[in-house]
Amino acid sequence: MSDNMNAVVNSETAQSIVAKNYNPMISNLTTLEVKNKTLDNYYNQIRNNYYLGVKAHYIIARDLYDAKQNLKNEDYQRLVEMCNFSGSTQRKYLLIGKDHRLFSLFAKGKLPISWTNQLLLTTLTDKQFEKVEKKIDAQTKASEIKKLAEMKSKQVERVENMLLTFLQIEVDKSKVNVAKFKSILNKVRKDLSKYPEIEIVDDKVNDVEKRISNYYQKIINQKKKESEKKEVKQKKVA
Protein backbone atom coordinates (compact mmCIF):
# COMPACT_ATOMS: atom_id res chain seq x y z
CA MET A 1 0.00 0.00 0.00
CA SER A 2 1.36 3.44 -0.91
CA ASP A 3 2.15 6.10 1.71
CA ASN A 4 -0.81 8.10 0.51
CA MET A 5 -3.20 5.18 0.93
CA ASN A 6 -1.73 4.45 4.37
CA ALA A 7 -2.52 8.04 5.23
CA VAL A 8 -6.09 7.57 4.01
CA VAL A 9 -6.55 4.44 6.11
CA ASN A 10 -5.21 6.15 9.21
CA SER A 11 -6.93 9.51 8.72
CA GLU A 12 -10.05 10.52 10.62
CA THR A 13 -11.73 11.82 7.47
CA ALA A 14 -11.38 8.43 5.81
CA GLN A 15 -12.67 6.32 8.71
CA SER A 16 -16.18 6.23 7.20
CA ILE A 17 -14.69 4.39 4.22
CA VAL A 18 -12.32 1.87 5.74
CA ALA A 19 -13.18 1.35 9.40
CA LYS A 20 -14.70 -1.91 10.62
CA ASN A 21 -17.71 0.02 11.89
CA TYR A 22 -18.20 1.66 8.48
CA ASN A 23 -21.71 3.05 8.12
CA PRO A 24 -22.88 3.33 4.47
CA MET A 25 -25.53 5.86 5.43
CA ILE A 26 -23.03 8.41 6.78
CA SER A 27 -23.31 11.29 4.34
CA ASN A 28 -21.37 14.12 5.94
CA LEU A 29 -19.14 16.17 3.68
CA THR A 30 -15.86 17.34 5.15
CA THR A 31 -16.31 21.03 4.44
CA LEU A 32 -13.85 22.74 6.77
CA GLU A 33 -10.73 24.16 5.16
CA VAL A 34 -7.71 21.91 5.50
CA LYS A 35 -5.71 23.40 8.40
CA ASN A 36 -2.52 21.37 8.17
CA LYS A 37 -1.88 21.93 4.48
CA THR A 38 -0.07 18.76 3.46
CA LEU A 39 -0.53 16.59 0.40
CA ASP A 40 -1.90 13.73 2.50
CA ASN A 41 -4.45 15.88 4.31
CA TYR A 42 -5.76 17.36 1.07
CA TYR A 43 -5.91 13.84 -0.40
CA ASN A 44 -7.75 12.48 2.64
CA GLN A 45 -10.45 15.13 2.51
CA ILE A 46 -10.92 14.98 -1.25
CA ARG A 47 -10.99 11.19 -1.16
CA ASN A 48 -13.57 11.11 1.61
CA ASN A 49 -15.86 13.60 -0.12
CA TYR A 50 -15.41 11.92 -3.49
CA TYR A 51 -16.54 8.58 -2.13
CA LEU A 52 -19.70 10.18 -0.77
CA GLY A 53 -20.57 10.79 -4.42
CA VAL A 54 -20.12 7.08 -5.13
CA LYS A 55 -22.53 6.24 -2.33
CA ALA A 56 -25.04 8.80 -3.58
CA HIS A 57 -24.96 7.39 -7.11
CA TYR A 58 -25.60 3.89 -5.80
CA ILE A 59 -28.64 5.04 -3.80
CA ILE A 60 -29.92 6.86 -6.92
CA ALA A 61 -29.48 3.65 -8.94
CA ARG A 62 -31.35 1.61 -6.34
CA ASP A 63 -34.20 4.12 -6.12
CA LEU A 64 -34.55 4.44 -9.89
CA TYR A 65 -34.77 0.67 -10.32
CA ASP A 66 -37.30 0.48 -7.50
CA ALA A 67 -39.33 3.24 -9.16
CA LYS A 68 -39.34 1.35 -12.47
CA GLN A 69 -40.75 -1.70 -10.72
CA ASN A 70 -43.48 0.16 -8.86
CA LEU A 71 -44.59 3.14 -10.94
CA LYS A 72 -46.84 3.10 -13.95
CA ASN A 73 -44.83 3.37 -17.16
CA GLU A 74 -46.08 6.91 -17.81
CA ASP A 75 -45.13 8.01 -14.31
CA TYR A 76 -41.72 6.37 -14.56
CA GLN A 77 -40.99 8.12 -17.87
CA ARG A 78 -42.06 11.38 -16.28
CA LEU A 79 -39.67 10.74 -13.38
CA VAL A 80 -36.80 10.18 -15.80
CA GLU A 81 -37.64 13.43 -17.58
CA MET A 82 -37.85 15.31 -14.28
CA CYS A 83 -34.44 13.95 -13.29
CA ASN A 84 -33.11 14.78 -16.77
CA PHE A 85 -31.47 11.35 -17.14
CA SER A 86 -30.20 10.49 -20.61
CA GLY A 87 -30.85 7.03 -22.02
CA SER A 88 -27.38 5.70 -21.26
CA THR A 89 -27.40 7.16 -17.73
CA GLN A 90 -30.78 5.57 -17.05
CA ARG A 91 -29.58 2.23 -18.41
CA LYS A 92 -26.47 2.23 -16.20
CA TYR A 93 -28.44 3.16 -13.10
CA LEU A 94 -30.99 0.39 -13.71
CA LEU A 95 -28.37 -2.30 -14.24
CA ILE A 96 -26.56 -1.28 -11.06
CA GLY A 97 -29.70 -0.72 -9.02
CA LYS A 98 -31.24 -4.12 -9.73
CA ASP A 99 -28.15 -6.13 -8.75
CA HIS A 100 -28.66 -6.79 -5.03
CA ARG A 101 -25.14 -8.21 -4.75
CA LEU A 102 -23.65 -4.73 -5.05
CA PHE A 103 -25.31 -3.74 -1.80
CA SER A 104 -22.91 -5.94 0.15
CA LEU A 105 -19.99 -4.00 -1.35
CA PHE A 106 -21.77 -0.71 -0.71
CA ALA A 107 -22.33 -1.66 2.93
CA LYS A 108 -18.62 -2.43 3.37
CA GLY A 109 -17.34 0.65 1.57
CA LYS A 110 -15.91 -1.53 -1.21
CA LEU A 111 -18.18 -0.50 -4.06
CA PRO A 112 -15.91 0.56 -6.98
CA ILE A 113 -15.59 4.29 -7.53
CA SER A 114 -15.93 3.83 -11.29
CA TRP A 115 -19.46 2.93 -12.27
CA THR A 116 -18.01 1.25 -15.37
CA ASN A 117 -16.53 -1.24 -12.93
CA GLN A 118 -19.83 -1.43 -11.06
CA LEU A 119 -21.48 -2.35 -14.36
CA LEU A 120 -18.81 -4.98 -14.97
CA LEU A 121 -19.67 -6.57 -11.61
CA THR A 122 -23.33 -6.93 -12.65
CA THR A 123 -22.28 -9.26 -15.50
CA LEU A 124 -20.53 -11.77 -13.23
CA THR A 125 -22.01 -15.09 -12.21
CA ASP A 126 -22.59 -15.61 -8.48
CA LYS A 127 -19.47 -17.79 -8.23
CA GLN A 128 -17.36 -15.17 -9.98
CA PHE A 129 -18.81 -12.44 -7.79
CA GLU A 130 -17.90 -14.38 -4.64
CA LYS A 131 -14.28 -14.60 -5.80
CA VAL A 132 -14.12 -10.88 -6.53
CA GLU A 133 -15.96 -9.82 -3.38
CA LYS A 134 -13.25 -11.26 -1.14
CA LYS A 135 -10.49 -9.07 -2.57
CA ILE A 136 -12.13 -6.04 -4.16
CA ASP A 137 -11.92 -2.50 -2.83
CA ALA A 138 -13.15 0.89 -4.04
CA GLN A 139 -10.17 1.36 -6.35
CA THR A 140 -9.94 -2.10 -7.92
CA LYS A 141 -9.46 -1.74 -11.68
CA ALA A 142 -11.55 -3.48 -14.32
CA SER A 143 -8.57 -5.58 -15.44
CA GLU A 144 -8.14 -6.84 -11.86
CA ILE A 145 -11.87 -7.62 -11.55
CA LYS A 146 -11.70 -9.70 -14.73
CA LYS A 147 -8.62 -11.49 -13.41
CA LEU A 148 -10.14 -12.19 -9.99
CA ALA A 149 -13.35 -13.45 -11.63
CA GLU A 150 -11.32 -15.60 -14.02
CA MET A 151 -13.40 -14.30 -16.91
CA LYS A 152 -12.86 -16.12 -20.18
CA SER A 153 -12.25 -14.19 -23.40
CA LYS A 154 -15.69 -15.14 -24.73
CA GLN A 155 -17.37 -13.74 -21.62
CA VAL A 156 -15.39 -10.52 -21.88
CA GLU A 157 -16.39 -10.19 -25.51
CA ARG A 158 -20.02 -10.90 -24.66
CA VAL A 159 -19.97 -8.19 -22.01
CA GLU A 160 -18.45 -5.68 -24.42
CA ASN A 161 -21.11 -6.48 -27.01
CA MET A 162 -23.99 -6.80 -24.57
CA LEU A 163 -25.83 -3.78 -25.92
CA LEU A 164 -26.03 -3.26 -29.67
CA THR A 165 -27.12 -0.13 -31.49
CA PHE A 166 -29.39 -0.83 -34.44
CA LEU A 167 -31.33 2.38 -35.06
CA GLN A 168 -30.38 6.00 -35.46
CA ILE A 169 -32.98 8.75 -35.63
CA GLU A 170 -32.28 11.83 -37.72
CA VAL A 171 -34.17 15.10 -37.74
CA ASP A 172 -34.09 17.94 -40.28
CA LYS A 173 -33.30 21.05 -38.25
CA SER A 174 -34.85 23.28 -40.91
CA LYS A 175 -38.23 21.64 -40.39
CA VAL A 176 -38.56 21.69 -36.60
CA ASN A 177 -38.03 24.15 -33.79
CA VAL A 178 -36.92 23.11 -30.29
CA ALA A 179 -40.48 22.79 -28.99
CA LYS A 180 -41.57 20.57 -31.88
CA PHE A 181 -38.42 18.48 -31.55
CA LYS A 182 -39.14 17.88 -27.84
CA SER A 183 -42.71 16.90 -28.68
CA ILE A 184 -41.54 14.39 -31.31
CA LEU A 185 -38.90 13.01 -28.93
CA ASN A 186 -41.47 12.44 -26.17
CA LYS A 187 -43.72 10.58 -28.59
CA VAL A 188 -40.84 8.37 -29.75
CA ARG A 189 -39.86 7.62 -26.15
CA LYS A 190 -43.42 6.75 -25.25
CA ASP A 191 -43.83 4.41 -28.22
CA LEU A 192 -40.50 2.63 -27.71
CA SER A 193 -41.06 2.28 -23.96
CA LYS A 194 -43.57 -0.46 -24.81
CA TYR A 195 -40.62 -2.71 -25.60
CA PRO A 196 -38.62 -3.54 -22.42
CA GLU A 197 -35.78 -5.03 -24.49
CA ILE A 198 -35.00 -1.61 -25.96
CA GLU A 199 -33.04 0.99 -24.05
CA ILE A 200 -33.26 4.53 -25.40
CA VAL A 201 -29.83 6.17 -25.52
CA ASP A 202 -30.44 9.89 -25.94
CA ASP A 203 -27.11 11.39 -24.91
CA LYS A 204 -27.12 13.76 -27.88
CA VAL A 205 -30.53 15.31 -27.22
CA ASN A 206 -29.14 18.46 -25.61
CA ASP A 207 -26.65 18.89 -28.43
CA VAL A 208 -29.43 18.52 -31.03
CA GLU A 209 -31.58 21.09 -29.22
CA LYS A 210 -28.70 23.56 -29.17
CA ARG A 211 -28.00 23.04 -32.87
CA ILE A 212 -31.66 23.55 -33.74
CA SER A 213 -31.79 26.67 -31.57
CA ASN A 214 -28.56 28.02 -33.12
CA TYR A 215 -29.90 27.35 -36.61
CA TYR A 216 -33.07 29.35 -35.99
CA GLN A 217 -31.13 32.12 -34.27
CA LYS A 218 -28.90 32.29 -37.34
CA ILE A 219 -31.97 32.61 -39.58
CA ILE A 220 -33.36 35.37 -37.35
CA ASN A 221 -30.04 37.23 -37.45
CA GLN A 222 -29.85 36.92 -41.23
CA LYS A 223 -33.37 38.27 -41.65
CA LYS A 224 -32.54 41.13 -39.29
CA LYS A 225 -29.46 42.06 -41.31
CA GLU A 226 -31.40 41.87 -44.57
CA SER A 227 -34.10 44.07 -43.09
CA GLU A 228 -31.51 46.61 -41.91
CA LYS A 229 -29.86 46.68 -45.35
CA LYS A 230 -33.25 47.18 -46.95
CA GLU A 231 -33.98 50.10 -44.65
CA VAL A 232 -30.62 51.70 -45.48
CA LYS A 233 -31.29 51.40 -49.22
CA GLN A 234 -34.76 52.89 -48.84
CA LYS A 235 -33.32 55.88 -46.91
CA LYS A 236 -30.72 56.47 -49.63
CA VAL A 237 -33.39 56.42 -52.34
CA ALA A 238 -35.53 58.83 -50.35
Image (spheres, helix red, strand yellow):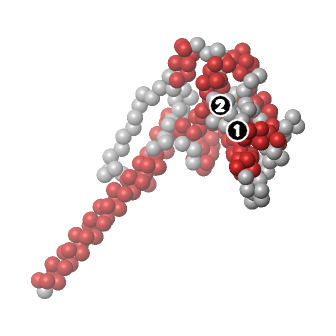
- Residue that protrudes farthest toward the left in the picture: 237
Which callout, 1 or 2, points at the residue further toward the start of the chain? 1
Element under disc 1: helix
Foreground residue, 98 or 74?
A: 98
At label 2, counting other C-alpha atoms closer than 10 Å, the crowd grade (few under 14, some 14-19, many 20 or more) is many
Q: Amino acid at mark 1?
A: Tyr
**Residue 183, image x, y percentages:** 46, 49
Give the distance between the C-alpha atoms of the residues marked 1 and 2, in whole angstroms: 9 Å
**Residue 232, image x, y percentages:** 19, 79
The residue sitting at 51% across, 26% down in the picture is 163
Q: Is residue 183 above or below residue 117?
A: below
Query: In the displayed structure, does residue 197 sit left or right of residue 98?
Result: left
Q: Quadrant of the C terminus?
A: bottom left
Q: Is residue 129 above or below residue 106?
A: above
In the rendered image, which residue does mark 2 sit on?
118
The residue sitting at 77% across, 53% down in the picture is 30
- Residue 183 appears in the rendering: no
Tell me the number on the disc at residue 58: 1
Residue 197 lies in what quarter of the image?
top right
